[in-house]
Amino acid sequence: MAATAAFREIQDVATDRAVFPPPSRNAKPVDRSAWIAAFHHVRDETERRAGPLSPEDQQVQSMADASPTKWHRAHTTWFFEQFLLREHLPGYTIYDERLHYLFNSYYVAAGPRQPRILRGLITRPTADDVAGYRAHVDRAVDALLSQASASALDAILPVLEIGLYHEQQHQELLITDILHAFAQNPLGPAYDAGWRFPRPVGAEGRSDLARGIVPIGHTGEGFSFDNESPRHEVLIQGGTIDRALVTNAQWLAFMADGGYTRPELWLSDGWIAAQAEGWEAPGYWRRDGVSEAEEISGRQAWASMTLAGIQPIDPALPVTHISYFEADAYARWAGRDLPTEFEWEVAAREDKLSDAFGLVWQWTRSAYTAYPGYRPVDGALGEYNGKFMSNQFVLRGSSVATAQGHARVEYRNFFYPHQRWQFTGLRLSDTRI
């Protein structure tokens, strides 16, 4: 598949809407064909996203936080083999036991693993070998879903479901990780020469947030990750929240006013990070190829590495590839706040936000921690979210790279405050005291 066609399907939110998300696993009788279709939809999407990449592209690991495309393809396959097939398909033959060391990520209970920073050294198995691994596991999952008894499906479907959403998370990482790798290449290669960032479509202005106690978290309907529960009540102080995302034009004004050179705007750790990394603009912004007149005017002095290669900064688009530290500094410069994740959730549920989904993940000022009464699930899958509830911040919404059917109002994404290789942006709020 051509690169343009491959990524265009990512952005078409109407594509296969009936296929994913899969049906409720509580439905009786279970629609096996629908679950099989959902499984193949997700597995095929991973291959579509990898399709434009050469074997060399799929091998590269550009930093410790990123992983090679080949590793994403293999790890998501290992997930189904480890947690679904080994446990639930009698007589299943492991494809290659050695791969479990290479493609386990962080599941300590599942055994030892290749250090994350060394994933790019796994030249064997090859990309073609990984395709064979995926095909082996796909056939076995088909057999499992076709043959399992109705009672067995009660235990199978919850694992299958989390495996599908897990693979969608890696589909987004596949895109952001290869973008980071391509950004290190002086040639500025394009993943998809025809790709363009979607235009914001929302209204400007601010929406009111009423003061009060509100329920937060998963409602019990449909899929959720464990970190979205239990549902509980929180106090919203009240105030306003911007309908629109902060744009590149607004960010350029922050930069022109010395935003990256004024320590009074920054958290201490953020200032240290900005100085150590030499930040003077969002991630992937560069001054390459601008004329002297453009440099003097400052309006078109910046370009950015994108999935289409190096492109001029469009002032109307939402700013992206910023860290929590940068978002916090911008809010302080603007005399505003970042919303809490609870303010964001309430506003999104009440349809008070423009472009809440599909452009950029939005930083909140909420630390990533457990909801009251949270308990991880038993076994190795209990390591999925809970053990990371430290020193990170919550982002809400979804991005241009998020898979169709993956975003939800209660979804809690999380990253460390210095990280900015994801499609991360912000909107502002005001808290009424």
Image (spheres, grey):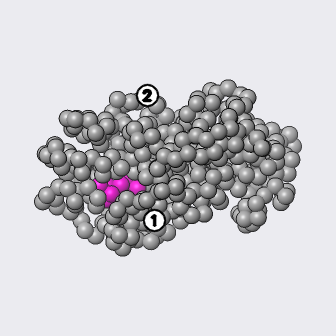
Query: Does residue 311 appear anywhere in the picture?
Result: no
Q: Tell me how far mark 2 sits from mark 1, CA to CA.
A: 35 Å
Does 77 appear in magenta? yes
314 sits left or right of 99 in the view: right
182 sits left or right of 381 in the view: right
Image spot of residue 88 (x, y percent): 20, 56
70 sits left or right of 428 in the view: left
Q: Mark 2 or mark 1: which comes first in sequence?
A: 2
Q: Secondary structure at mark 1?
A: helix
Give the residue displayed 39% in from the left and 70% down from the top: 108
- The reply to whether the C-beta atoms of the residues labelled 2 and 1 are less than 8 Å apart is no
Image spot of residue 20 (x, y percent): 36, 36
Give the residue displayed 40% in from the left and 38% down from the top: 221
Give the residue displayed 58% in from the left and 35% down from the top: 348
Q: Quadrant of residue 124?
A: bottom left
Q: Nearest the camera: 239 or 156?
A: 239
Q: Quadrant of residue 181?
A: bottom right
How packed mark 1 is, by other alpha carbons closer than 10 Å (few <14, some 14-19, many 20 or more), is many
Q: Nearest the camera: 293 or 243?
A: 243
Q: Secondary structure at mark 2?
A: loop
Q: Which label number is shown at residue 172?
A: none
Give the residue at mark 2: 14
Magenta-colored span: 70-80
Does 303 appear in magenta? no
Q: Identity of the amino acid at label 1?
A: Gly
Give the residue at mark 1: 120
Judge whether 162 appears above or below 34 on screen: below
Give the residue displayed 65% in from the left and 42% down from the top: 236
Query: Does residue 19 appear anywhere in the picture?
Result: yes
